[in-house]
Amino acid sequence: MDALFLQQMVNGLTLGSVYGLIAIGYTMVYGIIGMINFAHGEVYMISAYLSAITLALLAFFGLHSFPLLILGTLIITVAITCAYGWVIERVAYKPLRNSTRLAPLISAIGISLILQNYVQLTQGARQQGIPTLLEGAARLDFAGGFVQITYTKIFILLASFIGMGVLTYIIKCTRLGRMCRATQQDRKMASILGINTDRVISYVFVIGAAMAALAGVLITMNYGTFDFYAGFIIGIKAFTAAVLGGIGSLPGAMLGGLILGIAEAQFSSVINSDYKDVFSFALLVVILIFRPQGLLGRPKVTKV
Amino acid sequence: MKVPILELRNVDVFYGPIQALRDVSLEIHEGETVSLIGANGAGKSTLLMSIFGQPRAGGGEILYRGEDISKKSSHYIASNGIAQSPEGRRVFPDMTVEENLLMGTIPIGMTHAEEDLQRMFELFPRLKERRNQRAMTMSGGEQQMLAIARALMSRPKILLLDEPSLGLAPIVVKHIFQTLRELAKGGMTIFLVEQNANHALKLSDRAYVMVNGQIRMSGTGRELLEDPQVREAYLGGH
């Protein structure tokens, strides 16, 4: 097999798994309150800054072994980002729960602008960066050439798949997961059964933020740079992944992310990397024409 | 006299400018089976939902064991011993039978879950066969059994049932009412809302008749069954 193809496969999987993590936040929020959380990309951006700040602080206090450093960064970043997710829902969406469908959408765009400007003011408009944490790469030789995978990429793949696995387990098998699904399928009935649906909705925002924070740490590790505007394009990509997989569907978001990542990487190597975003969105358009509900989404059936 | 387990005092409910319930008063005592009969659109389902605050009562009081719950949240009310099998069953379509039943345990936790699941499977053997099947793939009768069983999983002090016979084959209706009779015999307090007045009145200790959002008549099940007006309006004449 072609070495370049395999190499791009690995790159695409890495990128796609991170898209998938962010897409989870879009799809779960849409599933439970039918709203696109346009501020979700900014939540990711915040977590990128948080991860860099945490890393610097931990290193400053003399923590230098990679496993401890990354574990500490993950825990602190996820915790603070969750707090952001929770506060955003409380402040910007909950008060609008019973108003028109458009109101929380506008509120979301507002929050997105506020967060961008807040970060720009406090952290500066310049690009920020962190040094490479994990040096080295694994090299796989075979007849047609070789594939090189950096340890960072291997770490990203492992971490994001573990993240998705844990989340899938929570949603499928735990009481909290059942409460989330029940609220998603019939909110009124869920409240009649004693579920505090407002609290469940808060949990969903927190879960989405946690996944975005994981993605934030991983992407920052991989690229090393970010700025206050970083949430926009990756947010749009992750949203595309969610729609591609079928918005509202959890496995759909993960699958959509992987497909988008792989397609982008392959397109970059075969045709032109400048047009990879155009290709991603064109792919979305084509899939929506033939499968409007997305790959794993279910069409809305109206029973008569 | 003992405090009723559930009492409505002069309750008014509005949907925007439209008044759905007008000065409704009724009471249910512990251990009783009480039914509310009336035509389609009389406000029966509204009454059951207003007990859960959806919609909220615009006037009057809803007392549960003497405490006014008309301003409380739905989940608070459910957590304190009132369970409902609602209009249209509303089982969670994408969840299995077992998961649906487990949703009933929210107010009391999982301590009795396994034991109560077995109890429900004895009460409705059909559900046992379908344990791992998704609720949307089941027949209307099976979904109705599931909705009742789900409500019972919270070990309620009072069970509210909205039209358990709606759209079901006569033999299934018979089976469901048989089960309700067993439950009542076991001491369960039941408040049943029905269009099928014949079945409902035969099951009930007492009943209320609702017309256009108002309580028109009340009496024991037997009295109402023999009342010429009720016979004329709800039992097909004869």
Image: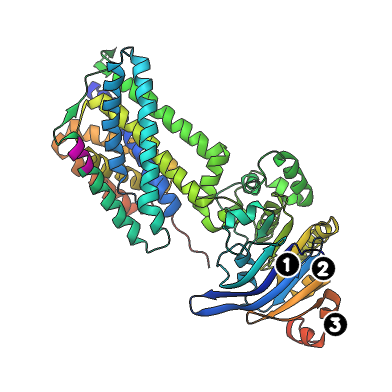
Q: Position of residue B52 (x, y in %)?
A: 61, 62
Q: Position of residue A75 (x, y in %)?
A: 39, 26
| Image quadrant where residue B44 sits | bottom right
Q: Which is nearer the N-term, disc 1 or disc 2?
A: 1
Chain letter for the residue marked with disc 1 in the picture: B
Give the alpha-carbon distance from disc 3 to disc 1, as whole Å: 19 Å
Q: Position of residue A33 (x, y in %)?
A: 43, 53
Q: Amino acid at mark 2?
A: Leu
Which residue was labeled with disc 1?
Answer: B192
**Point 55% across, 46% down: residue:** A179
Which residue was labeled with disc 3?
Answer: B226
Q: Nearer the viewer, residue B2 or B22?
A: B2
Give the alpha-carbon distance from disc 2 to disc 3, as whole Å: 14 Å
Magenta residues, as a range?
A118-122
| Image quadrant where residue A134 sits | top left
Chain letter for the residue marked with disc 3 in the picture: B
Which residue was labeled with disc 2?
Answer: B203
Is residue B162 toward the left or the right of residue A111 in the image? right
Mark 1–mark 2 CB contact (< 8 Å) = yes
